[in-house]
Each structure stands twice: as C-alpha cells, then as structure tokens.
Amino acid sequence: MAEETHTLKKETEFRRQALQWTETLRQEEDNTNTIQENKPSMFFSDKLRLMTGVQEKNIYPSLPDLGPLDISSMSSALYAKLTNFLTGLKNKNIKSDNSVFAEKYLGVIFLYELGFYPDVSSWYIGTPFISVNNGSGVEDVYEIPVLFMSKSGRFKCWISIDAAKATQNEFLIKQIVLGDLL
C-alpha cells in the first residue's frame, strides 16, 4: 500500500477491496443485522440482569435502615395525609387530642416519647406492609416504616394505619412505635 493511503478512509476502502469475502456457511448467519423480536436478549453484570422482552418492574432506591422507598401501593390521598401528619410533627403542630389518633392515649404517649428524641428535620417513607388479620382476607392495617432525620442522628418509626379508613380517604393511626436513635 502506498504512503498516501494512510488515512482511515483510504485504508478502509483499500481493505474492503483487498479482502475476499466468502459465502456464509449457514442461512441463519445472514440475519445478523435484523432484530429478533421473539427471542429476549440478556445482558449480564455482577449486580444486574436485564432481560428484554419481559415486562419491566420499577426500580426504587433503598436505605439500609429502612429498606426500599416504594410507596406505589399507597394511595395518593393516604400519602398526602401521612405527609401532612409528618409535616405537623416536624413543625410541632400535632396535639395529643388530634383526630388522626384512633385512641386519645396514643397521641399523649407518642408525643411524650417523641420529646426524648431530637427535633425532626426530614423523613423518608418506606414501603408499607399490608397486614391481613381477619378470616375474610380484607386488609386490616398498613404498617408504614418512616425514617426520621435530625441534626444529631436518625431514628425509625412504625406507623400503623387503619386500612378500612384509608380506603375511605381517612387517616386513623392505630399504633406508633419509635425505634432507637441511630
């Protein structure tokens, strides 16, 4: 090859003309550039396996102390009421006789215990667990994990909400459990 042909374009053209192509040995090899829609293709990595052609699932972030942050099973009305409650806790607007508590003593005890924790600055809501306790298979309670963040640490809280009231767009807390300061 002459010296003036050392550009990429010229070398490619020279190789294309110089190489002798052979016929394919199998008929299937001719379809290498076509997309096969019926066969899913797989891509592997250490932590991820994608399979195209299969219905995709949503991917949610996860926190070590809380788990996945998937709130898709929670209605938007329930999420809004939970967020209003958590905002009230942050702003210290929740009173012990608030109508969100199923029993008055829940609010009294919860707010008393919350006084031993640092002030809440933000929170993360985890994937709610749905408990079915009766024989009819009807949902009884949404158990919602919440990770409260503060300037001096974080702590977990479980909020149990009456599922029957939640389906009626009401918000009624049956139980609240505070975890240790992390």
Image (cartoon, rainbow, N blue to C red):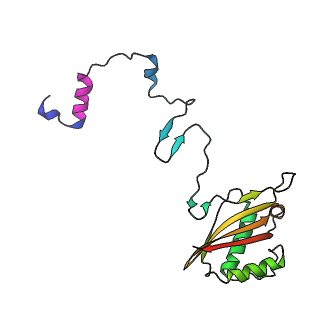
Identity of the residue drawn at 78% across and 70% down: 173
The answer to whether any part of residue 93 appears in the image is no
Residue 20 in picture, x, y percent from top left:
27, 19
Q: Which of 114 and 163 is in front in this view?
A: 114
Specify start and end residues of the magenta stretch as a single range.
Answer: 9-23
Identity of the residue drawn at 54% across and 80% down: 152
Magenta part, dominant SS? helix
Residue 27 in picture, x, y percent from top left:
45, 17
Residue 73 in picture, x, y percent from top left:
71, 56
Identity of the residue drawn at 12% across and 30% down: 2
View extreme (left): residue: 3
Residue 76 in picture, x, y percent from top left:
72, 62
Identity of the residue drawn at 39% across and 15% down: 25
| Residue 19 part of the magenta segment | yes
| Residue 37 part of the magenta segment | no
View extreme (front): residue: 180
Quadrant assignment for the C terminus: bottom right
Examine the rendered structure and indicate whether residue 130 appears above or below residue 24.
Answer: below
View extreme (right): residue: 136
Q: Nearer the viewer, residue 33 or 7?
A: 33
Total tally of numbered discs in the picture = 0
Examine the rendered structure and indicate whether residue 168 appears above or below residue 87.
Answer: above
Q: Does residue 129 appear left or right of residue 99 in this picture?
A: left
